[in-house]
Amino acid sequence: MGRTARSSTTAGPTLAVVAREAGVSVPTASKVVNGREDVAPETRRRVTEALVRLGYVRRPRFDAARTPGMVDLVVRSLASSWSGAVLHGVEEAAHDAGLDVVVSAALSRNRAGRPERGWLDKLSARGSAGVLFDLPELTEAQYTWLEQHRIPFVMIDPLLEPPPGVVSVGAANWQGGVMATEHLLSLGHERIAVLAGPRRTLCGGARLAGYRSALASAGLPHRPEYIRHTGPDEAAARRQARELLDLPQPPTAVFACSDRMALGVYEALAERGLRVPDDLSVVGFDDLPEARWASPALTTVRQPVSEMAATALRLLVRLMDGDRPESTRTELSTRLIARESTAAPRD
């Protein structure tokens, strides 16, 4: 596991050293540290890896009333713009709270694809005051281990419903599904398909429910052939989009429940010489930087990822102080960002 923060008594590398290691300018490295979005994905990846490898720490503000502490942030990957947004939110909130943050990637996985417990043992040995998990899920054994060791923790946008009592932060996914579908309905679309992501997931189920609710409010039945469950990556979405295009009555619009899936739809259309939005309107979900870089720019539902992460850190501080929140689930509002990937359907 890599570390991006050390104890406040240990001098870490300067930002200039990080920039030199990553082969970028100091201003570019600063943009990554501060969560700026105008950085190319490959550049962001190199800088993030350098931060982890060298153990860069942004000094927290001194607070004489609080003994500086340390918390862990365990992420699923360090190479995505999602993780960059999470890191930005956690870092800013930790800075305000006077905490150091150690960032780790859960790289060791078992046959089921879930993180192994070894890295949890390292959390205990390091003496962290609490942990934030930006992971799809934890195993029952891992939840039990955390409870036995009395380590406060908060889940950021878990993929599956966590056990009762586990504190988590996410987005208003049902609301987002409604907004995405209502946007397409307002443009005149009635044949609207949805790529809903894997079954049983918290976010996928809520976004699909929002889609169905918006159709019902408009007096339109949902068509089973238009509802597709697929993996979260572009390749899986591309396969489902091909099948939708091959239907006797293909949809005129697609609501993809992630920006990556939306980009898979783009690829399926390009393969057939079709264009967005002339031949198919597309709406995504997340509003990661890739949404703006797509051509045409992607209409999508914005999740406040950095704010979700910052909220999770503040909840973790409360748990560390022995103050449990009244509700274990906190949801932050989503909103539609209209760009160039949606238009009225062709006659």
Image (spheres, rainbow, N blue to C red):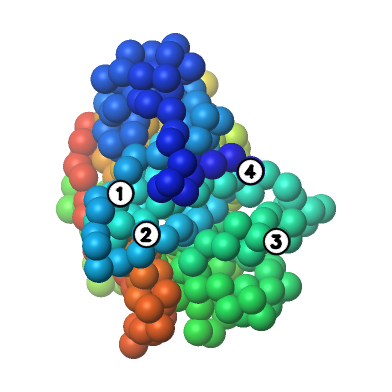
Can residue 221 be seen here? The reply is no
Tell me the SS state at disc 1. Answer: loop
Q: Which tag, 1 or 3, sits closer to the chain's start?
A: 1
Identify which amino acid the numbered label 4 is placed on. Met
Q: Which tag, 1 or 4, sits closer to the chain's start?
A: 4
How far across and down, in percent of the image, does residue 124 sit?
64, 64
Q: CA gap, disc 3 to disc 2?
A: 22 Å
Position of the N terminus, as image quadrant, is top right
Q: CA gap, disc 3 to disc 4?
A: 12 Å
How far across and down, in percent of the image, does residue 203 sit?
45, 63
Give the tally of numbered discs: 4
Q: Which residue is mark 2?
A: 68
Q: CA gap, disc 1 to disc 3?
A: 26 Å
Judged by depth in the image, the label closer to the viewer, 1 or 3, is 1
Tell me the SS state at disc 2. Answer: loop
Judged by depth in the image, the label closer to the viewer, 1 or 4, is 1
Q: Which residue is mark 1?
A: 60
Q: Nearer the viewer, residue 203 or 210?
A: 203
Residue drawn at 53 percent across, 62 percent down: 128
Horizontal relation, residue 275 to residue 111: left or right: left
Q: Which residue is mark 4?
A: 1
Identify which amino acid the numbered label 3 is placed on. Asp
Q: State if disc 3 and disc 1 touch (CB < 8 Å).
A: no
